[in-house]
Amino acid sequence: MNEESSQETLRNKAEKIFRYALSSVDAKKLLKEKITVKNSILNVDNFFEIELDKFNKIIVLGSGKASVPMAYAIEDILKDRISYGLVVTKYGYGSRLSKLEVVEAGHPVPDKKGVEATEKIIEILKKCGKDDLVIYLLSGGTSALLCAPEDKISLKDKQKITELLLNSGANIKEINTVRKHLSKVKGGKLGRYAHPARVINLILSDTIGDDISITGSGPFVYDKTGSSDVEFILKKYNIFDKLSDYMKKFIEERKGETVKPESKALNNCKHYVIGNNTIALENAGIKAEEYGFNSMILTSLMEGEAREVAKITAGIAKEILFYNRPVKKPACVLCGGETTVTIRGSGKGGRCQEFALVSALEISGLKNVVVLCGGTDGTDGPTDAAGAIVDSFTVERGLKKGLVAEKHLKNNDSYNFFSRTGELIFTGPTNTNIMDIVIILVS
């Protein structure tokens, strides 16, 4: 077997490991494993139980890129016990449900459909009483899909600040801190509308360390950030001066404060994480070992600028190749988390594709090394690809087609590089969203 054929075998195994990891965190499957009903008792993974018959109404609501598969599962579990409900998801991620209304809306930048769906959810919650149960299905993407601007802030202003934040290199904690204070529903504020009803918040986590106050900007969760943090973050990334006069005034006057623990306003809400990145990494390791690799989870807490993190992980691949450490060849090193990209060019791509392009440059010419970086929701940035897979021949493949990897990287144009070299990964909607996965194979 020649070198390129050997690399192709490694590439195929890396993609199979990735897809197996995705299947392990399918939201519908996870929910059915964690939630059961027996003799009218709802059991949440033996974490807590609740008697369903004592409620007048059971309302199911949800938001996020995995909200529809989660809703499929909860419909199957609760059946006719559900009174009504609504879930909002990203365009292309919806399908028909038997009991619940489905709305598709804009992501990652919010749009009018998202605003309308959020207003419907607010109105439903306002009508809930103390003898009603609300089951909320929360997954990544909620911060954009659940949109209700505070105090006369326009949708146009929300869209602008979202785009500026996404392109700035700010991490998701910083982005969602700003979002919480400009919204009527984030930072625990949606939970206030639900009071005094009981709320069960079922979460598919897409945040570092499963911080549920960050996932979806924590619509039912107490928040510890302050309105003063918003101005600091926006000035840190040189965004504040680009905002409208009204937005500046709103922020300077410290409006939009979130719900704090001392208020006890959300004591009627219970939360449970049904799935996360760690589950996917553990299952990726199992599949890798079936292929004969020595697997190691390096981290599930990966964050930082994509191109810098990629240099570190490429260095680990080289360490394994040359010195058989920190794990012996044949090796599979797994990382999970969410990096950021500071947009300086005018190209097309996402954080996973940028990560992969840097990796390709770092491992160029090395034998028997493959790096895959993929978004578990099936869409990396504003593209239709989940990510990309690279090896020691990637840069050379580009040159043969007249593509210079460094130039594409400088222009944040990884998508157009990989679309020509044939190294993009396409999954379509995956029924999940638990951040990103990096798979490094060294044989």
Image (spheres, helix red, strand yellow):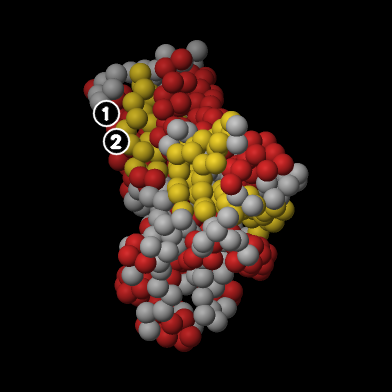
Q: Quadrant of residue 105?
A: bottom right
Q: Is residue 344 visible?
A: no
Q: Quadrant of residue 180?
A: bottom left
Q: Amino acid at mark 2?
A: Gly
Q: Residue at x 46, y 15 (%)?
A: 291
In the picture provided, is 294 more to the left or to the right than 160? left
Q: Residue at x 68, y 46 (%)?
A: 82
Q: Which mark is residue 315?
A: 2
In the picture provided, is 240 more to the left or to the right than 85? left
Q: How far is disc 2 from disc 1 in space, using C-alphas?
A: 6 Å
Q: Is residue 194 visible?
A: yes
Q: Which mark is residue 159?
A: none
Image height of 19 relative to 208, above or below: above
Image height of 181 relative to 355, above or below: below
In front of the other: 231 or 73 = 73
Q: Quadrant of residue 119?
A: bottom right
Asked if disc 2 and disc 1 are in contact, CB closer than 8 Å, the reply is yes
Residue 233 drawn at (x, y percent): 34, 69
Name the element at disc 2: helix
In front of the other: 314 or 366 = 314
Q: Residue at x 28, y 22 (%)?
A: 327
The crowd level at tag 2 (other Cα within 10 Å; few <14, some 14-19, many 20+) is some
Q: Amino acid at mark 1?
A: Glu
Image height of 250 relative to 195, above or below: below
Residue 125 drawn at (x, y percent): 60, 62
In front of the other: 207 or 6 = 207
Q: Residue at x 33, y 70 (%)?
A: 226
Q: Which mark is residue 319?
A: 1
